[in-house]
Amino acid sequence: MKKYIHLSILAILSIGCSKTTVVLLDSGKPNSSIIVSTQKGSSKVDKIGSYVELKDSNKAPSAVKKMSPDELQNRFGKVISSAPKKPISYRLYFKKGSTELTDESKEIFKKALNSIKERSPCMVDIIGHTDTVGSDTINAKVSLKRSKYVKSLIEKTGLKTLSMKAKGYGENDLFVKTSDNVDEAKNRNVEIFIK
């Protein structure tokens, strides 16, 4: 009987009676790799669907082999489908100097609510940002006020989450890099991260 352990969304480790298989999955990040080591050697798995087998901790891992998408699905489909979904995010924009969403952002917010509902229970992080007009202190307060406002809108729907946090970054971590005192609408936003 085999036992499957899911390591993040990067790899699947299949432990059988006679061997262990380590498979690299698509993590969505470029240049992902896994180093599989024993006392007798190591192998680097750096292509999606590639794998190594371990038969004994006193032997080196096998040479790297490639698994077809069909074989990967046949052997590990249940594990892959039960893995957490990749985080998604939505960016909402505000009218200048307010917590009022733009008309386009009201529609994006509805999509975010649908994603929260589909992934429930999930974790939601709400991060507020501002442009660089005004002082750092005021911008920090405005960004937090915007993120708390979005959080309250989500809470009013009654959607279930494992956790939901609202944070304000002010004019730090700008979406569009600008110098100080620049009125940039794209920097007046709240990001909703759904995990």
Image (spheres, rainbow, N blue to C red):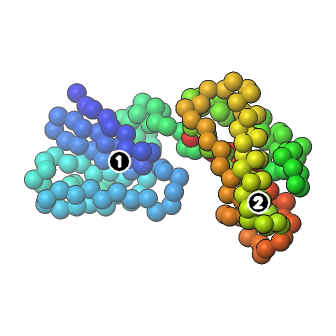
Residue 48 left/right relative to 59: right
Q: Distance between the residues labelled 2 and 1?
A: 46 Å
* Vertical side of 169 occupied by 53: above or below: above
Q: Mark 2 points at which residue?
A: 139
Q: Looking at this rendering, what residue extends furthest in the bottom direction?
A: 179
Q: Dividing the image into 4 quarters, which one contains the N terminus?
A: top left
**Residue 112 visible to an observer of this rendering:** no
Q: Can you tell which of label 2 and label 1 is closer to the viewer? A: 2
Residue 111 left/right relative to 70: right
Residue 48 left/right relative to 125: left
**Element on which disc 1 rests:** strand
**Element on which disc 2 rests:** helix
* Vertical side of 56 occupied by 79: above or below: above
Q: Dividing the image into 4 quarters, which one contains the C terminus?
A: top right
Q: Along the line of sight, which residue is nearer the eye, 101 or 13? A: 101
**Residue 178 visible to an observer of this rendering:** yes
Amino acid type for the residue under numbered disc 2: Asn
Label at residue 23? 1
Q: Quadrant of residue 194?
A: top right
Q: Estimate the x, y position of residue 92 in percent, counting from the top left.
A: 78, 48
